[in-house]
Image (spheres, rainbow, N blue to C red):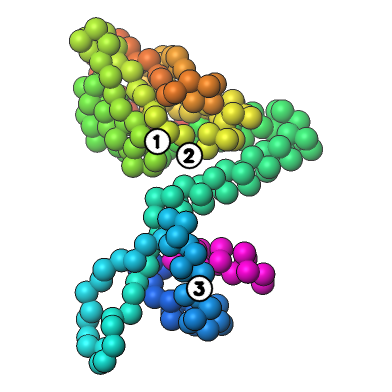
Amino acid sequence: MDDQGTKESVLDLVVEKGPVTASVIAKILGLTTAAVRRHIATLEESGQIVAHDIAQVSPRGRGRPARHYVATDLAHQRLHDSYAEIAGKALTFLAQTAGTDAVESFAAVRSREIERKYAPVIRAAGTDPRARATALSDALTQDGYAASVREIGGGKFAVQLCQGHCPILAVAEEFPQLCEAETQAFARLLDVHVQRLATLAGGKHVCTTHIPVASLSKRTGWRHDSKRA
Protein backbone atom coordinates (compact mmCIF):
# COMPACT_ATOMS: atom_id res chain seq x y z
CA MET A 1 0.00 0.00 0.00
CA ASP A 2 1.44 3.40 -0.97
CA ASP A 3 1.61 6.42 1.32
CA GLN A 4 -1.63 7.95 0.00
CA GLY A 5 -3.45 4.66 0.31
CA THR A 6 -2.27 4.26 3.89
CA LYS A 7 -3.46 7.75 4.78
CA GLU A 8 -6.88 6.99 3.31
CA SER A 9 -7.03 3.74 5.29
CA VAL A 10 -6.24 5.66 8.48
CA LEU A 11 -9.02 8.13 7.70
CA ASP A 12 -11.47 5.32 6.93
CA LEU A 13 -10.76 3.75 10.31
CA VAL A 14 -11.20 7.05 12.14
CA VAL A 15 -14.56 7.49 10.42
CA GLU A 16 -15.61 3.92 11.20
CA LYS A 17 -14.26 3.49 14.73
CA GLY A 18 -13.77 6.99 16.12
CA PRO A 19 -13.09 8.02 18.80
CA VAL A 20 -10.04 5.83 18.20
CA THR A 21 -6.35 5.98 19.13
CA ALA A 22 -3.31 5.78 16.89
CA SER A 23 -2.23 2.54 18.56
CA VAL A 24 -5.54 0.84 17.76
CA ILE A 25 -5.33 1.94 14.12
CA ALA A 26 -1.72 0.76 13.96
CA LYS A 27 -2.69 -2.67 15.24
CA ILE A 28 -5.48 -3.03 12.67
CA LEU A 29 -3.29 -1.93 9.76
CA GLY A 30 -0.18 -3.78 10.92
CA LEU A 31 1.86 -0.57 11.12
CA THR A 32 3.92 1.11 13.79
CA THR A 33 2.17 3.67 15.96
CA ALA A 34 4.72 6.26 14.84
CA ALA A 35 3.79 5.69 11.19
CA VAL A 36 0.09 6.09 11.96
CA ARG A 37 0.73 9.25 13.96
CA ARG A 38 2.49 10.75 10.94
CA HIS A 39 -0.64 10.26 8.83
CA ILE A 40 -2.84 11.50 11.67
CA ALA A 41 -0.80 14.71 11.81
CA THR A 42 -1.36 15.23 8.08
CA LEU A 43 -5.08 14.57 8.41
CA GLU A 44 -5.31 16.99 11.33
CA GLU A 45 -3.55 19.70 9.32
CA SER A 46 -6.00 19.23 6.45
CA GLY A 47 -8.96 19.51 8.83
CA GLN A 48 -10.26 15.99 8.26
CA ILE A 49 -9.82 14.68 11.81
CA VAL A 50 -9.60 16.25 15.26
CA ALA A 51 -8.58 15.08 18.71
CA HIS A 52 -11.57 14.14 20.83
CA ASP A 53 -11.62 14.41 24.62
CA ILE A 54 -12.77 11.17 26.18
CA ALA A 55 -13.04 10.19 29.81
CA GLN A 56 -10.50 7.64 30.96
CA VAL A 57 -12.29 4.59 32.34
CA SER A 58 -9.20 3.34 34.16
CA PRO A 59 -5.82 4.85 35.02
CA ARG A 60 -3.12 4.31 32.41
CA GLY A 61 -0.21 4.81 34.74
CA ARG A 62 2.45 7.34 33.92
CA GLY A 63 2.39 9.57 30.88
CA ARG A 64 -0.31 11.46 29.08
CA PRO A 65 -3.66 9.81 28.26
CA ALA A 66 -3.84 8.39 24.74
CA ARG A 67 -5.38 10.83 22.27
CA HIS A 68 -8.55 9.73 20.54
CA TYR A 69 -9.52 10.99 17.10
CA VAL A 70 -12.79 11.54 15.26
CA ALA A 71 -13.59 12.58 11.70
CA THR A 72 -14.76 16.13 10.94
CA ASP A 73 -17.67 17.20 8.76
CA LEU A 74 -15.15 17.89 6.00
CA ALA A 75 -14.02 14.27 6.03
CA HIS A 76 -17.58 13.00 5.90
CA GLN A 77 -18.35 15.33 2.99
CA ARG A 78 -15.35 14.07 1.05
CA LEU A 79 -16.46 10.51 1.62
CA HIS A 80 -19.93 11.40 0.33
CA ASP A 81 -18.29 12.95 -2.74
CA SER A 82 -16.34 9.75 -3.35
CA TYR A 83 -19.46 7.63 -3.08
CA ALA A 84 -21.28 9.99 -5.44
CA GLU A 85 -18.47 9.64 -7.98
CA ILE A 86 -18.74 5.85 -7.83
CA ALA A 87 -22.53 6.02 -8.18
CA GLY A 88 -22.19 8.34 -11.17
CA LYS A 89 -19.79 5.99 -12.90
CA ALA A 90 -22.10 3.05 -12.21
CA LEU A 91 -25.10 4.84 -13.73
CA THR A 92 -23.03 5.92 -16.72
CA PHE A 93 -22.01 2.32 -17.29
CA LEU A 94 -25.65 1.24 -16.92
CA ALA A 95 -26.78 3.81 -19.48
CA GLN A 96 -24.06 2.81 -21.94
CA THR A 97 -24.63 -0.93 -21.66
CA ALA A 98 -28.38 -1.18 -21.06
CA GLY A 99 -29.72 2.12 -22.37
CA THR A 100 -31.67 4.99 -20.86
CA ASP A 101 -34.62 2.73 -20.04
CA ALA A 102 -32.42 0.99 -17.48
CA VAL A 103 -31.62 4.32 -15.85
CA GLU A 104 -35.33 5.15 -15.76
CA SER A 105 -35.99 1.81 -14.07
CA PHE A 106 -33.28 2.52 -11.52
CA ALA A 107 -34.80 5.93 -10.81
CA ALA A 108 -38.23 4.34 -10.33
CA VAL A 109 -36.80 1.89 -7.81
CA ARG A 110 -35.13 4.74 -5.94
CA SER A 111 -38.42 6.63 -5.90
CA ARG A 112 -40.15 3.71 -4.20
CA GLU A 113 -37.28 3.39 -1.72
CA ILE A 114 -37.67 7.06 -0.76
CA GLU A 115 -41.39 6.52 -0.31
CA ARG A 116 -40.94 3.46 1.89
CA LYS A 117 -38.27 5.16 4.00
CA TYR A 118 -40.26 8.27 4.86
CA ALA A 119 -43.81 6.84 4.95
CA PRO A 120 -43.70 6.05 8.70
CA VAL A 121 -42.57 9.61 9.45
CA ILE A 122 -45.40 11.11 7.41
CA ARG A 123 -47.94 8.76 8.95
CA ALA A 124 -46.82 9.66 12.48
CA ALA A 125 -47.25 13.38 11.73
CA GLY A 126 -51.02 12.95 11.47
CA THR A 127 -53.36 14.49 8.92
CA ASP A 128 -52.40 18.16 9.11
CA PRO A 129 -50.74 18.96 5.77
CA ARG A 130 -48.25 21.45 7.18
CA ALA A 131 -47.24 19.01 9.90
CA ARG A 132 -46.65 16.32 7.30
CA ALA A 133 -44.57 18.65 5.15
CA THR A 134 -42.56 19.66 8.21
CA ALA A 135 -42.07 16.03 9.20
CA LEU A 136 -40.74 15.25 5.73
CA SER A 137 -38.46 18.29 5.92
CA ASP A 138 -37.07 17.21 9.30
CA ALA A 139 -36.44 13.67 8.05
CA LEU A 140 -34.65 14.97 4.97
CA THR A 141 -32.50 17.23 7.12
CA GLN A 142 -31.43 14.26 9.22
CA ASP A 143 -30.30 12.62 5.99
CA GLY A 144 -28.17 15.61 5.01
CA TYR A 145 -30.51 17.59 2.74
CA ALA A 146 -30.63 20.77 4.90
CA ALA A 147 -34.38 21.01 4.31
CA SER A 148 -36.89 23.59 5.51
CA VAL A 149 -40.53 24.54 4.93
CA ARG A 150 -41.56 28.02 3.82
CA GLU A 151 -45.14 29.21 3.91
CA ILE A 152 -46.63 30.78 0.80
CA GLY A 153 -49.42 33.29 1.29
CA GLY A 154 -49.46 32.71 5.02
CA GLY A 155 -49.42 28.97 4.52
CA LYS A 156 -53.15 28.78 3.89
CA PHE A 157 -52.87 27.52 0.35
CA ALA A 158 -49.34 26.24 -0.15
CA VAL A 159 -45.93 25.66 1.36
CA GLN A 160 -42.57 25.14 -0.26
CA LEU A 161 -40.21 22.36 0.72
CA CYS A 162 -36.67 23.70 0.27
CA GLN A 163 -33.55 21.54 0.24
CA GLY A 164 -30.31 23.48 0.57
CA HIS A 165 -28.01 20.51 0.08
CA CYS A 166 -28.06 17.41 -2.10
CA PRO A 167 -25.81 14.48 -1.11
CA ILE A 168 -26.05 13.11 -4.66
CA LEU A 169 -25.74 16.44 -6.49
CA ALA A 170 -22.93 15.35 -8.81
CA VAL A 171 -24.95 12.32 -9.91
CA ALA A 172 -28.22 14.24 -10.23
CA GLU A 173 -26.56 16.82 -12.47
CA GLU A 174 -25.80 14.06 -14.95
CA PHE A 175 -28.98 12.06 -14.39
CA PRO A 176 -31.97 14.38 -13.76
CA GLN A 177 -34.17 11.29 -13.63
CA LEU A 178 -33.16 11.05 -9.97
CA CYS A 179 -34.66 14.48 -9.25
CA GLU A 180 -37.89 13.48 -10.95
CA ALA A 181 -37.96 10.23 -8.99
CA GLU A 182 -37.66 12.18 -5.74
CA THR A 183 -40.48 14.52 -6.78
CA GLN A 184 -42.74 11.58 -7.57
CA ALA A 185 -41.97 10.05 -4.18
CA PHE A 186 -42.90 13.30 -2.41
CA ALA A 187 -46.19 13.41 -4.32
CA ARG A 188 -47.10 9.88 -3.27
CA LEU A 189 -46.02 10.47 0.32
CA LEU A 190 -48.11 13.64 0.67
CA ASP A 191 -50.91 12.27 -1.54
CA VAL A 192 -51.09 15.43 -3.61
CA HIS A 193 -49.68 16.72 -6.88
CA VAL A 194 -46.47 18.59 -6.04
CA GLN A 195 -44.43 20.71 -8.41
CA ARG A 196 -40.65 20.95 -8.48
CA LEU A 197 -39.87 24.61 -9.11
CA ALA A 198 -36.08 24.50 -8.96
CA THR A 199 -33.21 22.10 -8.36
CA LEU A 200 -29.61 22.37 -7.28
CA ALA A 201 -28.76 20.02 -10.14
CA GLY A 202 -30.34 22.53 -12.51
CA GLY A 203 -28.06 25.30 -11.29
CA LYS A 204 -30.31 26.92 -8.68
CA HIS A 205 -29.20 27.63 -5.12
CA VAL A 206 -31.86 25.37 -3.58
CA CYS A 207 -34.23 22.55 -4.55
CA THR A 208 -37.77 23.90 -4.21
CA THR A 209 -40.93 21.80 -4.23
CA HIS A 210 -44.35 23.51 -4.24
CA ILE A 211 -46.91 21.70 -2.05
CA PRO A 212 -50.57 22.84 -2.22
CA VAL A 213 -51.90 22.39 1.31
CA ALA A 214 -55.44 23.62 0.61
CA SER A 215 -56.24 20.48 -1.37
CA LEU A 216 -54.43 18.40 1.22
CA SER A 217 -56.63 19.79 3.98
CA LYS A 218 -59.71 18.46 2.23
CA ARG A 219 -58.33 14.93 2.21
CA THR A 220 -58.91 12.60 5.12
CA GLY A 221 -57.42 9.35 6.29
CA TRP A 222 -54.14 9.52 4.38
CA ARG A 223 -52.18 6.32 4.61
CA HIS A 224 -49.24 4.81 2.83
CA ASP A 225 -50.36 1.90 0.68
CA SER A 226 -47.62 -0.71 0.83
CA LYS A 227 -49.04 -2.35 -2.28
CA ARG A 228 -48.02 0.70 -4.29
CA ALA A 229 -44.43 0.48 -3.03
- Is 40 in front, or is 139? 40
Q: Amino acid at mark 2?
A: Pro
Q: Would you say residue 4 is visible in this rendering?
A: yes
Residue drawn at 62 percent across, 66 percent down: 5
On screen, residue 219 above or below 126: above
Of callouts 2 and 1, which one flags the residue occurring earlier in the amino acid sequence?
Answer: 1
In terms of secondary structure, what is the magenta stretch mainly? helix
Marks 2/1 in contact by CB < 8 Å: the verdict is yes
- Is 155 in front, or is 31? 31
Q: Would you say residue 226 is visible in this rendering?
A: no
Please tell me in which quadrant of the rendered image residue 135 appears. top left
Report which residue position mark 2 lands on: 167
Q: Amino acid at mark 3?
A: Arg
For marks 1 and 3, give the one nearer the viewer.
Answer: 3
Q: CA distance from mark 3 to mark 2?
A: 31 Å
For marks 3 and 2, give the one nearer the viewer.
Answer: 3
Specify the farthest residue to the right.
Answer: 97
Residue drawn at 54 percent across, 21 percent down: 202
Q: CA distance from mark 1 to mark 3?
A: 35 Å
Q: How many residues crowd mark 3 within 10 Å: few (<14), some (14–19), many (20+)? A: few
Residue drawn at 62 percent across, 29 percent down: 175
Please tell me in which quadrant of the rendered image residue 185 appears. top left
- Which span of residues is magenta-colored? 1-14
Q: Secondary structure at mark 3?
A: helix
Report which residue position mark 3 lands on: 38
Tell me if 134 is positioned left or right of 97 in this view. left
Query: Which mark, by number, is residue 145?
Result: 1
Asked whether 11 falls inside the magenta stretch, the response is: yes
On screen, residue 94 above or below 158: below
